[in-house]
Amino acid sequence: MTFNVKNKTLIFIVIIFILNIIFFGYIFYKNLQNELLEIKEINFNKIKTSFEKNIQVHYVDFYTKKTQDILTNDMINAIQNKDKDVLLKLALPIFDMLKKEKLLNQMHFHLEDGTSLLRVHNPSSYGDDIASLRPLIKRVHDTNKIAFGFEDGISGLSYRVVVPVFKDSAYIGAIEFGSSPEGILHLVTIFNEISGILYFDNLHLSSKEQNKIQYMRIHDRFYYTLLNNMTNLVDYQYINKNNRLIAIYSFDIQNYSKQKVGHFVFFNDLTKYQTKFEETIVDFFIISLVSFIVIFLIINFGFNIIINKLQLSYDTIKRYTKLIDENVITSSTDLKGNITYTSEAFAKISGYSQGELVSKNHRIIRHPDMPKELYENMWKTIKNNNTWQGEIKNRKKDGGFYWVKATISPSFDENNKKIGYTAIRQDITDKKIIEEISITDGLTNVYNRRHFNEIFPKVINSANRKDELVCFLLLDIDHFKQYNDNYGHQAGDDVLIEFAKCLKENLKRADDMVFRLGGEEFGVLFKSETKEKAIEFANNLKEKIVELKIVHEYSSASPYITASMGLVCKYGDEIKDMDEVYKDADDLLYKSKQNGRNQVSING
């Protein structure tokens, strides 16, 4: 049998096409499979991070700070005097409030000798030797330091935070907060839109907690069948059943003695990713088959069909290009940073039209909060023909802002001559807002102590490298307790808000920062060219506070709200660590108070 040129060509094309389908199909399948595995890992890490972070932020950090707020002198005296009646009267309203807000179910005062002074949740039960039964309590008595973790008790398994109590620097006992594990389950399932259960597998809990499944937040009974059919629990596993892909994440619950007492088990329905994976495979082979038929027809029926199909392909490309233009934040500039092209998505997020952006310099969206050093580093990188990546806060046309994760690369023409730069961006505004919330004081809207502890060492290291002067101003509102006692705590909160706003509005540089360090104590971290200018800045702040004219009839320093301040200015290589700077500032603050308040004391 002989074949003409056309048939030979068709047979050759069919063979080549089939080989290509097998080869590229395999590569495509493996890439999709890797993407699915990556999605599984990302989801697991997301839930794991949420689980650990919710325990730290909503329990350890919350109750550690709350202890500072609620331990009044009267309460400390009641603990020292072992006066249960007074202590119950002071603690019960606080317990009721926390129980309502945080799923708190135990509040317990312990004496230094290891015995129970008062169970606020069960006042009739006291005097038993708790320290001999519970390692967590004994640990606090032995070390006089905070301890926390899961531990059994007569009220069942709870996550407990135990904080030592001191009177004139002498240890007199401890206060214990016990929270139901249901609270952790609730937070993780709500934040991540998943289901979960609390699963016990020990026999050491009280009789009312002998059921293996103690708490649950499940919206699909299908998950029960999965759990009942499992022989063991591992960190994470995936079950394909009834055309569904379910991820099961298990986090061990260990008590303070490192004994495993159960698991948090979370169910995450990944069916949509599995379905997308399968549909994409089917689409690939459908597209491959259609492509084969199209190619066959093109060769068999001539150039008219070729032209028609080319036009169809061109229209498809146009649609995809339009889709990219509408959804991907991209732009191109010339070598000077003047915009030559923007996608529709870029115009939409910035609030400008494409016509308003083209020919303008990229500085049009530059936000004043971003340090100039970031842009200097960016330009240095891309001018050297390297790719720069980073997170940038941009300014909208209406004055608002948005955050992007940007990748900027140089662009070249056909002769390999650099003609400009191209940027591709991802909108991360929601992520940055969540980060900002975690480092911001909820009342005053300035940075909190946690962010201070994180950022101060970085500022010191940067100043050491650049030989810069670091200035730290520690402020304390004069006679604030008397203000609270006489005007009320709501009025006191209003003072804190106005005080913080005053500090923030009078900062000089974008990288100057205000922190609420605790109660009425604030800190300002700033850079200054000279120590004299730093002193001038501090004194100006002192006057601005007085100019608020917030009346304080119970202050010995002034008829208005004032602040005592301690200012430390040192070069980076003169600083041992942040604790040294903080102590120096605190000593100077004390000096200001001793000398009559409403003044600034400066290090020599």
Image (cartoon, grey):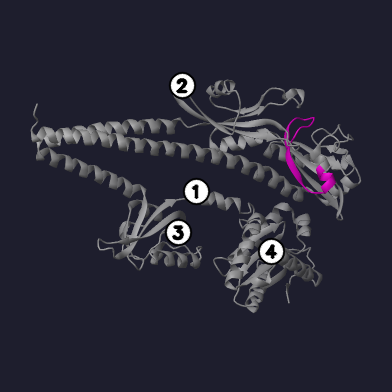
Instruction: Specify whether residue 559 is in view.
Output: no
User: The residue under label 2 is which amino acid type?
Assistant: Asn
User: The residue under label 1 is which amino acid type?
Assistant: Asp
Label 2, secondary structure: give it.
Answer: loop
x, y (%) of residue 472? 67, 68
The residue furthest front is 1
Residue of label 4: 578
Answer left or right for 285 relative to 75. Answer: left
Residue at x-position 59% and y-position 34%: 235
In primary-sequence order, the first of circles 4 and 2 is 2
Residue 420 appears in which quarter of the rendering? Answer: bottom left
Residue stretch in magenta: 139-159
Label 1, secondary structure: give it.
Answer: helix
In primary-sequence order, the first of circles 1 and 4 is 1
User: The residue under label 4 is which amino acid type?
Assistant: Met
Q: How far apart are marks 1 and 3 (CA)?
A: 14 Å
In primary-sequence order, the first of circles 4 and 3 is 3
Residue of label 3: 394
Instruction: From this view, report whether residue 40 is shown above or below residue 542.
Output: above
Residue at x-position 89% and y-position 47%: 80
Q: How far apart are marks 1 and 4 (CA)?
A: 32 Å
The residue furthest right is 81
Quarter of the picture containing the N terminus is top left
